[in-house]
């Protein structure tokens, strides 16, 4: 019977080993280490009892726990790849077969196509979330990115993945305690330690209080998940294989994403980035309106980050809570209203800059939404709620405008910004300020890149955009397309640094389809590395705008700091070789 029970495991391992070369994974035949063997319950119980009686033995046991959790079996990458494709392969095949079928059938029936795609999205979105929660690692990060764009992926996926913002299941407290005790003198540093504030792909955050010896402040403590770095590295290989099959055009973005995200696994570096970003904000025009937590550098280690605790709630949660308050505490109705508005924005094709809603139509829209849950309200009661809704909307858009302006200052003036903005790391503080947290993916722009980007954004932000000037600025930045098509290059610029509106007006409902179309006209063969994360930041802000029912054009907000940067630094055209690509850093003045 014992051999029969082992056969399924042998088959799985055999499948994993066979599949490994398909995903570029090297598999070692080394046997499992002792850290991976299951210990009998009796032995484990005796170890626990002895550890309780001996602090030295307890410390040894804690260290072995961290080592055990951090170690990765040589077969694990192949096993994860097999698990991923076992779940995702049929989903990709279903979409591909449907796409192929529509090429020969129902070609003129747009409604049937829409209904079919919607049914597929609703069917597979929960499966996608299950895969992410099972494998975690990089896939949580990708899910967070997608969930922040209400107009980036189909609505069912946005709804399913939104739970990933900071509600990933946390690690056991025993593991967290072991990591902390290995990094610092736990009892000497912390007066109290407990509440989980959030858990994400790389680590989780706890609320704690320092002892008087270390100031007695309330702090947030970020603890890295054991083995996160090696899992991310292997997951990139798996996701790259998915891009080859189902997400063409993502190669340059994925390359830059990998280069940057693989720098997140040292919290000492993040603490110093946090310190630099905080210093910049404190000397900026936003010092009294935006707050970045102060890191406790002396308490940080590669796996532990201790920083000032910011008391507030996520920006999106703040909007939802205020809307629920207006709707008599009905959070379900508030969520329904927000989702309806996001869907309306996502499906809208008339989203150009000139689109304006009259106060009358806005009033009627809000009145209709309120009517769904307030049939018994008097006219005066409904009118009061509508005015409160309008005030709430103005307040939320004001916060988003402040966030856009502050980020523009960081990009174009400071040259240092957060390349991983998402709804989970923007807080509305009780003091009224915005809190910016999580600087694991801090980006730094050299002067020549900063000025080149500024020229692109200044041209895009004009009321009457000059296609020739935009395309020339893009080439100065380092973008190169196959045919040097000015019109197409200008559309690429708008997609990356301004808005998706042009694509929607031309009938492409998502940025991915619009990107595919632009590449079919004149493919972009060179995308400069510094552009990728600025574009990603622009995409994130547009997603936040969708959460707040607003169609954003990021170049309009960023044009002012871009102009200030150019005026302060001058127009350094001499930094560019023939006006096409930046000179090497050694040949250019990159101070500041």
Image: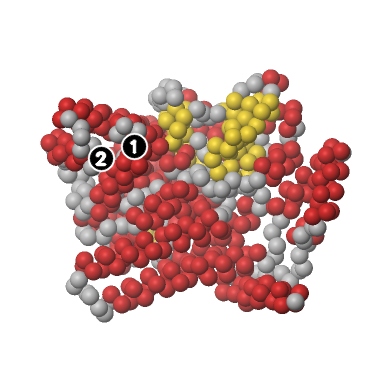
Q: Position of residue 127 (x, y in %)?
A: 46, 62
**Circle 1 residues within 10 Å: few <14, some 14–19, many ≥20:** some
For the point 50% across and 27% down, which residue is it?
A: 311
Which of 403 and 484 lies nearest the eye of the viewer? Answer: 403
The kind of secondary structure element at disc 1 is loop
- Name the image colouring: secondary structure
Locate residue 20, reporting x and y percent: 61, 72
Q: Residue at x 43, y 70 (%)?
A: 92
Mark closer to the chain start, 2 or 1:
1
Regarding residue 532, the answer to whether it shows in the image is no
Element on which disc 2 rests: loop
Badge number at residue 330: 1
- Res. 403 image quadrant: top left
In the depicted view, which residue is nearer to us: 128 or 370? 370
Number of numbered discs visible in the structure rendering: 2
Closest to the observer, 359 or 506: 359
Residue located 65% across and 32% down the image: 193
Q: Quadrant of residue 547?
A: top left
On the rendered image, what quadrant is the N terminus found in?
A: bottom right
Residue annotated with mark 2: 373
Please give left or right for residue 301 compared with residue 349 in the image: right
Disc 2 and disc 1 in contact, CB within 8 angstroms: yes
């Amino acid at each position: 019977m014992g051999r029969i029970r082992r056969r399924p495991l042998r088959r799985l391992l055999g499948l994993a080993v066979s599949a490994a070369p398909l995903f570029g994974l090297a598999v070692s035949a080394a046997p499992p280490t002792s850290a991976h063997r299951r210990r009998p319950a009796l032995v484990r119980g005796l170890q626990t009892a002895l550890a309780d009686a001996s602090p030295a033995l307890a410390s040894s046991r804690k260290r072995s726990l961290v080592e055990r959790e951090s170690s990765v079996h040589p077969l694990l990458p192949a096993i994860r790849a097999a698990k991923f494709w076992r779940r995702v392969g049929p989903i990709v095949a279903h979409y591909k077969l449907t796409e192929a079928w529509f090429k020969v059938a129902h070609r003129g029936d747009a409604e049937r196509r829409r209904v079919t795609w919607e049914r597929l999205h609703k069917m597979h979105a929960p499966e996608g979330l299950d895969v992410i929660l099972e494998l975690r690692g990089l896939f949580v990060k990708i899910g967070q990115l997608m969930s922040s764009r209400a107009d980036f992926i189909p609505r069912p996926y946005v709804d399913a993945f939104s739970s990933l913002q900071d509600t990933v299941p946390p690690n056991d407290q025993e593991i967290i305690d072991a990591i902390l005790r290995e990094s610092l003198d736990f009892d000497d540093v912390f007066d109290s330690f407990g509440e989980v504030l959030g858990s994400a792909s790389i680590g989780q955050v706890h609320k704690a209080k320092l002892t008087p010896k270390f100031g007695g402040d309330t702090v947030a403590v970020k603890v890295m998940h054991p083995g996160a770095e090696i899992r991310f590295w292997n997951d990139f290989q798996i996701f790259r294989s998915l891009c080859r099959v189902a997400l063409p055009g993502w190669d340059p973005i994925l390359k830059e994403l990998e280069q940057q995200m693989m720098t997140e696994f040292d919290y000492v570096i993040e603490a110093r980035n946090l310190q630099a970003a905080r210093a910049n904000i404190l000397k900026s025009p936003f010092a009294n309106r935006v707050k970045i937590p102060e890191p406790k550098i002396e308490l940080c280690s590669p796996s532990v980050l201790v920083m000032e605790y910011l008391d507030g709630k996520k920006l999106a949660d703040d909007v939802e809570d205020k809307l629920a308050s207006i709707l008599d505490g009905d959070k379900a109705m508030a969520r329904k209203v927000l989702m309806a508005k996001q869907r309306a924005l996502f499906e809208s094709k008339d989203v150009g800059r000139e689109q304006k809603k009259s106060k009358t139509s806005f009033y009627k829209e809000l009145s209709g939404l309120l009517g769904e849950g307030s049939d018994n309200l008097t006219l005066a009661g409904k009118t009061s709620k509508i005015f409160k809704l309008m005030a709430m909307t103005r307040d939320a858009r004001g916060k988003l405008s402040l966030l856009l302006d502050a980020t523009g200052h960081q990009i174009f003036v400071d040259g240092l910004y957060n390349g991983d903005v998402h709804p989970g790391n923007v807080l509305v503080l009780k003091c009224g300020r915005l809190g910016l947290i999580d600087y694991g993916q801090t980006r730094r722009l050299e002067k020549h890149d900063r000025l080149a980007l500024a020229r692109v954004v200044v041209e895009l932000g004009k009321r009457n955009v000059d296609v020739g000037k935009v395309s020339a600025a893009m080439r100065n930045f380092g973008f190169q397309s196959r045919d040097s098509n000015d019109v197409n290059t200008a559309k690429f610029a708008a997609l990356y640094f301004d808005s998706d509106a042009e694509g929607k007006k031309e009938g492409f409902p998502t940025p991915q389809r619009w990107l595919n179309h632009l590449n079919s006209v004149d493919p972009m063969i060179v995308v400069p590395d510094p552009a990728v994360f600025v574009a990603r930041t622009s995409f994130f802000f547009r997603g936040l705008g969708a959460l707040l029912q607003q169609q954003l054009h990021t170049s309009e907000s960023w044009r002012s700091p871009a102009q200030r940067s150019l005026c302060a630094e001058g127009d350094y055209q001499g930094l560019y070789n023939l006006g096409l690509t930046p000179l090497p850093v050694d040949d250019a003045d990159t101070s500041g």
